[in-house]
Amino acid sequence: MRLDRTLALITELPAAVLVALETLILFAGVISRYVFNAPLTWSDELASILFLWLAMLGAVIALRRDEHMRLTTFLGLMGPRRRAWVETLGVVVVLVFALLMLEPAYEHFLDQWVVTTPALDWHDGVRVAAIGVGCVLLLVIALARLAERASLQDALSCIVFVAFVAGGLWWLKPVFAQLGNWNLLIFFVAMVAFCVVLGLPIAFAFGIATLAYLIFTTSTPLTIVVSRMDEGMSHIILLSVPLFVFLGALIEMTGLARAMVDFLATLIGHVRGGLQYVLLGAMYLVSGISGSKAADMAAVAPALLPEMKKRGAKEGDLVALLSASGAMSETIPPSLVLITIGAVTGVSIAALFTGGLLPAVVGMLALGIVVYFQSHGENMRGVTRASGAQIRKALWIALPALALPFVIRTVVVEGVATATEVSTVGIAYTVLAGLFVYRQFNWKRLLPMLVETASLSGAILLIIGCATAMAWALTQSGFSKALVELMAVVPGGKAGFMAISVIAFTILGSVLEGIPAVVLFGPLLFPVARALGIHEVHYAMTAIFAMGLGLFTPPFGVGFYAACAISKVAPDKAIGRVWPHLGALFLALIVIAAIPWISTGFL
């Protein structure tokens, strides 16, 4: 416990400070450039240096808090004894990953030390040292977890098991040398699937598979893994990930989300299914601000679900609708998946932000039809229609909150701020609205919110880093070229390729979640789409909507379980009720894939 408190102190407070500093630095850059016409030449550079430290410290915090993204479906089916052993095995694999990364991280630090930054004239080693420090802290936390949670017998047996597997793979090196690209199936399909099924965090599953592939089938130095991770995690556009996560937490804390929900409730809360329609509309509006599905659901559900239960709505239907609305809103800017797909494929972020609005409307209409048929038996006793005065009052109160999505979009379109910086404008707006308009700003919650932002962001960014290294290995093996050639000749041309993409991204979204799936397969499949004449924004919207559908589809989709947790409803009560909603979204997906104008009409 003493060690745990020490680790919390040396990671959480610096990470919280880094989130605050990143916000201030980027916002100062916007003000200096747009208001005073005096750009800060060093702002992006300093933000980039601090960003890698934020990402690694966040990954460490997420490991200490058990907040890394992972699949727990199969763990839940195990008995207590077997589950304890498998959990211990996962910790040992994390330990091995951190150990293997130490020397390459140090070598990468030495290589980058000779490089200096143009504006600040700092050694780049100051930035990349974050990877080595992060690996040391990951190692310490893994050792602490073994000491705290695992029996000596389980720890020793897991270490022996991992050593036995490593020894067997080393003995088979001559065989691997003859297998060629079959090694990709062994390491990047079988090994990754094995690790994910056992509940290992997805980032470490990608990382250990990539390290094993390079060690046992190639002579490539492991520093390439660190350099690819550095490249994947340091893309400046990804700095918007922690900032939008923080913005999502702020709009809930300052009352902006509640104001929007209350206004929508006064408009249509009196009709049958009215609150369900309010939930859909609120998810659409809030998603346009926060960029985080978990933040969206947490902001909307507590305000609506109690009243919906009073009206006789079944718990399972509520969770099903909340889950499906999360899938529906994946394309709404500034979705983190939109930002990621723009970063890894080179598609314009502004175009993605514009193209994502109508696909979500199609999904919302499809869910609205389901709600219409499900709400016939709703108990409307005691429900009164809001008067005109009440509607006007609710609108007046909600106006500052309703204006925020338009402020964010206008700031980007008019060139006031970049896609990375716009979140800081939203944060400043939300803070001012919370302090002076809604008079709702809990200073005591600020530090925990900053730490939670760092943790979630670190978990996401470590996945991106490890997936970038894995994608590099796939590219170097020639797999990407073979995939392009195969996909380019699928039967049916564009239609056949889109059909395969819909199925593939739905499955990938279910198993890997949207962001790692995008990082892995976006750079491979987008060139094929371009070669076939498919508009890249249309393809992006189809892929993101499909991954969102998979993300919230049980039994693997973790978004479904997040909706259950936020609603405080057992998954078994909702799993049988979610299929009509997901079926409606699948039909919406077919419409989006078949009609490019829905994604490109306003570009």
Image (cartoon, rainbow, N blue to C red):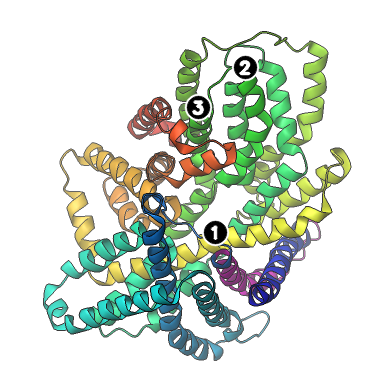
Which of the marked residues, 3 or 1, is nearer the chain's N terminus? Answer: 1
Q: Is residue 578 visible?
A: yes
Above or below, 591 against 337 in this view is: above
Q: Is residue 204 left or right of residue 288?
A: left
Whole-percent x, y for residue 270 in the image: 67, 12
State the CA–CA distance, disc 2 to disc 3. 22 Å
Q: Inspect the image, locate mark 3, and give the three-letter code of the amino acid beneath it.
A: Met
Q: Which residues are magenta?
A: 35-62
Q: Is 311 located above or below residue 442 in the figure?
A: above
Q: Amino acid at mark 2?
A: Arg
Q: Residue at x 67, y 8 (%)?
A: 381
Q: Residues within 10 Å of mark 3 (few under 14, many from 20)?
A: many
Q: For the stretch drawn in magenta, what is the main secondary structure?
A: helix
**Residue under circle 3?**
364
Q: Residue 323: within the magenta?
A: no
Secondary structure under tag 1 reads loop
Which residue occupies the foreground of this view, 258 or 574?
574
- Judged from the image, the secondary structure of the residue bearing numbered disc 3 is helix
Q: Which mark is residue 311?
A: 2
Q: Nearer the viewer, residue 497 or 546?
A: 546
